[in-house]
């Protein structure tokens, strides 16, 4: 039974931040993830906002890790070459009652150590964002945006390049804390049998593992994981947020983030307008408690409400020119009848030594992640000896010998495009026409995926399939590339891992010469 | 048949144009045509026929023909060739007709094809040429042209664009994507499908899936009338007992990993979904045929005005956009229901672009042509010279005994007049009209003046 010093449960932004922080300290570390890639759940489906820290009660974990994380995020993103922008944010009051709340938020921000806040009037609001509604606003220039899925992937890559193992499509089903029979945690992992013997999936971990320390970063599943050890922990209440993505054409119509004053019992900060680092505008998220923590559906009623609310925040915005809707799910500790927020729980369990429990990490978890990771690293240091981090690979590391492409072709100038194409003709072959993603970047992304190769994994790494045509043009081309360059037959191609197969088979038997070059899948190709 | 592994030499097997497989930067052409689908091919022919010295066809796929290559069903060419052809056969005819302009020596040839070429941006140079920056077969080039014809066709509206509610699992795609996967890449997309929207591609794919052994559980349409042609409703749905549900919307897509079904419900006359009629239909695939959007991004970025109804550029009687020298045709301009008309329109754009390239296009003050009651849109949207002008239009709803009139209008800024209404330039009663069928009308316009087009039922 393989023994790891540390097993981290969950490859969201928290699990990957912790893995990256612990990487290179001499510990053997394994990250278990039930999905097929890092950040496939809540970490990829949120506003991507790096919060200033005005919203959280002073002295709380949320306030403390938010303000610290806000400071750490910019240098971290620079180092990892992850898109980050300090846009600033306006929290807008429409009436005097709300304006009074702005002052409370300002005072709370002061207490939390948020720098450079200002309460501004209409003229100043209009200067920052022409066409904005409202009477007064709290301006927080330290609010920023980050690409949440790129950050999660980059952290996973850093961890992986520095020796952390990852096991995807691996759902933890049992934890036996250390006891008389074993000095270590014993873990049972359910593996999806469809991942065996396939070129699409990489080998998952053994189904039986041992660990000295277990870190629970399972997000929506964190209560379930904690209870496997026998400890008591509050329930997680999944709370869905739906979003609209507006057409890229509108990117210049929003200069900075616009939020309403949050309601007292709202489970979120209110539907807001957010720029993304890719240049599209998001409207959302809504705030619906749901039963099923995997139900990322969208609903017609909420989507209509999003359009209306977006229009209310910025009447000049064309909220009817959208390309997609999506939803993400918050792992909330506050039950529906209470609403609002409860604090993050981050503790080294007193009942089960060696179990580090993180739960209820909803907003501002993304912002807080670098600070939480440093804190958890200290907790691990009290349980296990941490070595000095030397010879660690910094920056955005190569993965299995494939370097990171720091200049995205779509963002390059005309001369730079000419140079890139002269250097590598694969740049001259455009695969995704909406986002101008060349073959060179698709190939690079596939080579850098160290878990299962999925269409969503390629999407999050390249932006292919994210544009206006929503993969109508490039899906079939990417499918061809996976067959021809990576020997992954169409039948094995998935959207997000086992069970999400894109196609059901072949119309006609494959050409036998071609079939010989494809890996055996157990299917008969003869007539 | 397995799809072709590597890009083929684009033209060697088609018998026309050979050269420009490698574009040389700064080469000058009289006319550049963006897109070598049916519109682009006919536009190139029109330009060459009208005497353009050199015509460059730029195509992003590795061969000419565009969407026709995946349309293996028949029904093409009835008007243009008096034959029933498949899509690839129609493309072949169009390509063959260009061979007259191709000689063995490039210096004697008129039409050149650059396949695997993406036009990135278009700038206007100071020398009367447009500069087209292209990624072409693995190299970056900038070519020049006196006039440019946009013939990029259209794309399909997506699940995201219609806010399809529910989950977003594997198994949802546009009908055209499924068509390419099946007909070119030999891939089956599912075993039991629901097709949302009754556009022609969805109808064609309903039949195609059925012929390949899949089941089509339903075709749904939110409007009370189908979006596709009558003949497709009959030949693709009724002949195969595929149910068509009109006035039916989708409440929710089900399935976390792969589609497991849809919940559909009737739409009441007031436009709301009737929740009591909601029913679950199991399926593993959802295809969308909910409208086509002209690929107008490049032409809009070049500065041309876009029509908010057609979503293609605004053009005059020469099919010239609001930017002199830039022309548009085919499905980029308006979504055609028959390729034959797209070809005809494109030939005309080609001839005009050739004339423009040699400084032979007259222009005057552009007067608006306005679609009024009963009419969705009219093309061209502007006229600047009188003459016999061919208009195309669509009505807003199916009607019988429908009279369409072209009247001299006041223009947008003219003061109200006490004069009696002018006599119509055109007036005709149509026995039956439908939004799914484009209407083409030739009108003699004595001069450039504002026009108003309206329609109404007469009982």
Image: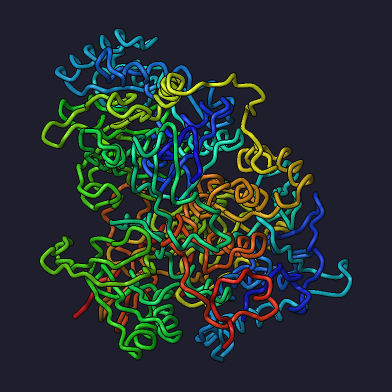
Total number of numbered labels? 0
Is A201 drawn above or below residue A327 in the view shown? below
Identify the image's colour scheme: rainbow, by chain, secondary structure or one colour: rainbow
Image quarter of residue A223: top left
> x, y percentage for residue B239?
35, 91
Q: Residue at x 78, y 72 (%)?
A: B17
Q: Is residue A487 left or right of residue A305?
A: right
Instruction: Locate the C terminus of chain A by quadrant.
Output: bottom right
> x, y percentage for residue B437?
38, 76
Tell me, yes or no, if residue B256 can be seen here: yes
Q: Nearer the viewer, residue A294 or B427?
A: A294
> x, y percentage for residue A11?
44, 40
Q: Nearer the viewer, residue B350 or A121?
A: A121
Q: Nearer the viewer, residue B37 or A449?
A: A449
> x, y percentage for residue B322?
54, 51
Tell me, yes or no, if residue A278 can be seen here: no
Q: Residue at x 29, y 8 (%)?
A: A111
Is B170 drawn above or below residue A279 in the view shown? below
Q: Residue at x 39, y 70 (%)?
A: B425
């Amino acid at each position: 039974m393989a023994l790891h010093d540390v097993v981290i449960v969950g490859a969201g932004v928290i699990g990957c931040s912790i893995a990256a922080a612990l990487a290179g300290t001499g510990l053997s570390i394994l990250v278990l993830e039930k999905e097929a890639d890092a950040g496939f759940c809540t970490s990829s489906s949120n506003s991507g906002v790096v919060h200033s820290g005005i919203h959280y009660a002073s002295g709380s974990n949320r306030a403390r890790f938010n303000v610290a994380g806000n400071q750490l995020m910019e240098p971290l993103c620079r180092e990892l070459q992850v898109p980050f922008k300090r846009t600033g944010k306006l929290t807008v009051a429409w009436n005097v009652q709300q304006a009074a709340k702005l002052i409370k938020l300002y005072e709370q921000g002061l207490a939390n150590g948020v720098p450079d806040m200002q309460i501004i009037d209409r003229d100043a609001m209009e200067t920052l964002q022409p066409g904005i509604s409202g009477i007064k606003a709290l301006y927080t220039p330290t609010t920023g945006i980050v690409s949440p899925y790129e950050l999660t992937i980059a952290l996973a890559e850093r961890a992986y390049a520095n020796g952390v193992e990852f096991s995807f499509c691996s759902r933890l089903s049992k934890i036996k804390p250390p006891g008389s029979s074993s000095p270590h945690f014993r873990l049972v992992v359910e593996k999806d049998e469809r991942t065996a013997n396939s070129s699409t999936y990489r080998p998952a971990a053994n189904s039986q593992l041992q660990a000295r320390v277990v870190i629970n970063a399972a997000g929506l599943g964190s209560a379930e994981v904690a209870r496997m050890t026998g400890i008591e922990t509050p329930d997680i209440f999944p709370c869905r947020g739906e979003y609209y993505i507006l057409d890229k054409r509108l990117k210049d119509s929003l200069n900075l983030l616009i939020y309403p004053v949050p309601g007292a019992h709202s489970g979120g900060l209110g539907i807001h307008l957010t720029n993304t680092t890719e240049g599209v505008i998001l409207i959302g998220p809504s705030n619906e408690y749901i039963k099923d923590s995997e139900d990322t559906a969208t609903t017609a009623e909420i989507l209509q409400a999003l359009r209306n609310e977006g229009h209310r925040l910025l009447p000049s915005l064309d909220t009817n020119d959208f390309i997609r809707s999506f939803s993400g799910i918050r792992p909330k500790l506050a039950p529906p009848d209470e609403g609002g927020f409860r604090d993050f729980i981050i503790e080294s369990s007193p009942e089960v030594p060696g179990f580090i429990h993180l739960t209820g990490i909803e907003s501002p978890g993304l912002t807080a992640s670098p600070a939480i990771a440093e804190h958890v690293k200290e907790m691990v240091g009290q349980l296990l000896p941490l070595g000095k981090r030397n010879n660690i690979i910094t920056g955005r590391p190569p993965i299995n010998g494939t370097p990171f492409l720091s200049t995205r072709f779509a963002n390059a100038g005309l001369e730079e495009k000419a140079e890139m194409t002269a250097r590598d003709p694969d740049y001259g072959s455009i695969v995704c026409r909406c986002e101008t993603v060349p073959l060179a970047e698709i190939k690079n992304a596939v080579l850098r995926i160290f878990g299962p190769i999925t269409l969503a994994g390629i999407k999050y790494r390249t932006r292919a399939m994210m544009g206006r045509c929503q993969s109508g043009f490039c899906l079939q081309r990417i499918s061809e590339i996976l067959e021809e360059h990576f020997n992954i037959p169409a039948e094995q191609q998935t959207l997000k891992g086992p069970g999400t197969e894109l196609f059901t088979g072949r119309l006609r038997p494959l050409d036998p010469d071609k079939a010989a070059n494809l890996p055996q899948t157990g299917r008969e190709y003869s007539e | 048949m397995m799809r072709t592994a590597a890009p083929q030499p684009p033209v060697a097997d088609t018998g026309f144009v050979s050269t420009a497989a490698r574009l040389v930067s700064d080469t000058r052409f009289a006319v550049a045509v963006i897109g070598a689908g049916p519109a682009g091919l006919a536009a190139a022919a029109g330009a060459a026929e009208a005497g353009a010295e050199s015509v460059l066809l730029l195509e992003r796929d590795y061969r000419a023909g565009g969407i026709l290559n995946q349309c293996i069903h028949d029904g093409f060419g009835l008007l243009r060739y008096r034959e029933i052809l498949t899509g690839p056969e129609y493309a072949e005819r169009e390509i063959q007709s260009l061979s007259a302009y191709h000689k063995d020596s490039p210096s004697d040839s008129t039409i050149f094809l650059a396949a695997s070429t993406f036009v990135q941006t278009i700038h206007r140079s100071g020398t009367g040429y447009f500069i087209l920056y292209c990624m072409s077969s693995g190299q970056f080039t900038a070519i020049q042209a006196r006039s440019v014809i946009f013939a990029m066709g259209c794309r399909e509206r997506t699940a995201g664009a219609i806010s399809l509610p529910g989950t977003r699992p594997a198994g949802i795609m546009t009908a055209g994507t499924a068509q390419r996967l099946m007909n070119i890449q030999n891939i089956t997309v599912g075993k039991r499908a629901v097709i949302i929207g009754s556009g022609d591609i969805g109808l064609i794919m309903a039949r195609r899936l059925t012929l390949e052994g899949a089941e089509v559980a339903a075709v749904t349409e939110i409007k009370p009338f189908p979006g596709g042609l009558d003949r497709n409703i009959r030949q693709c749905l009724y002949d195969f007992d595929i149910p068509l549900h009109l006035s039916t919307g989708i409440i929710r897509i089900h399935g976390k990993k792969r589609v497991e079904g849809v919940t559909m419900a009737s739409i009441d006359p007031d436009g709301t979904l009737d929740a009591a009629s909601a029913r679950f239909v199991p399926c593993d695939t959802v295809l969308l045929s909910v409208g086509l959007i002209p690929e107008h991004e490049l032409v809009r970025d070049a500065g041309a005005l876009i029509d908010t109804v057609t979503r293609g550029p605004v053009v005059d009687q020469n099919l010239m956009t609001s930017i002199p020298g830039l022309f548009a045709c085919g499905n980029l301009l308006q979504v055609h229901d028959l390729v034959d008309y797209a070809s005809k329109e494109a030939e005309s754009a080609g001839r005009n672009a050739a004339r423009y390239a040699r400084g032979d296009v007259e222009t005057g003050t552009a007067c608006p042509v306005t679609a009024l009651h009963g009419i969705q849109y009219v093309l061209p949207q502007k006229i600047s010279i009188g003459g016999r002008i061919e208009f195309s239009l669509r009505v807003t709803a199916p009607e019988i005994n429908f009279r369409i009139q072209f009247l001299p209008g006041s223009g947008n800024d003219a003061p109200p007049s006490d004069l009696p209404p002018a006599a119509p330039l055109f007036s005709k009663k149509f026995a039956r009209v439908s939004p799914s069928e484009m209407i083409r009308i030739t009108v003699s316009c004595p001069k450039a003046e504002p026009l108003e087009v309206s329609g109404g039922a007469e009982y």
